[in-house]
Amino acid sequence: MLKCSELVERSDALLAGELSWRQRMSFRMHLFMCRHCRRYVKQLERLLRAIPGMHGKANEAEVEQVMRRIREDDQEQHRH
């Protein structure tokens, strides 16, 4: 089964539909069992839907900055 860190690293591929059937099933199993990752993926989905309405297409640095903040927040939540 996937570790939380593996799910976080590849969640953008999940949302982009770039994973194989087997990989998607592994993600689904993990999400079924891990409420923290479910919340993370839901937040990422919302963020990706909101970005186009904020301004023009985000550049790579902006995307990385947002993703870094999400990972930091996720790690902070796992510590508590």
Image (cartoon, helix red, strand yellow):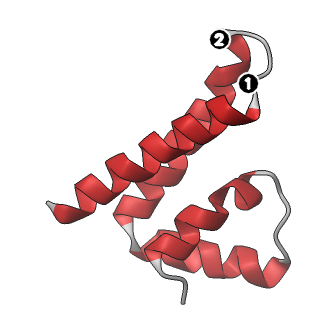
Look at the numbered discs 1 and 2 and tell me whether their residues touch, using CB distance below 8 Å.
yes
- Residue at image location 62% in from the left, 73% down from the top: 27
Q: Nearer the viewer, residue 62 or 35?
A: 62
Corner quadrant of residue 74: bottom left
Q: Amino acid at mark 1?
A: Ala
Residue 14 percent location from the top left of the image: 72, 60
Q: Residues within 10 Å of mark 1 (few under 14, many from 20)?
A: few
The three-letter amino acid code for the residue at tag 2 is Met
76 relative to 63 in the view: left or right: left
Dividing the picture into quarters, in which one does residue 51 lie? Answer: top right
Give the residue pinned by disc 2: 54
Tell me where residue 24 appears, x and y as whole percent.
73, 73
Give the farthest residue toward the bottom. 1
Q: Which residue sits at x=63%, y=22%?
A: 50
Residue 60 position in % (x across, y down): 74, 36
Q: Residue at x 73, y 24 (%)?
A: 58
Q: How many marks?
A: 2
Near mark 2 (Cα within 10 A), the count class, few <14, some 14-19 or many ≥20, is few
Residue, disc 1: 58
- Give the secondary structure at mark 2: helix
Looking at the rendered image, the disc whose residue lies closer to the viewer, 1 or 2, is 1
Relative height, residue 63 to residue 29 (above, below): above
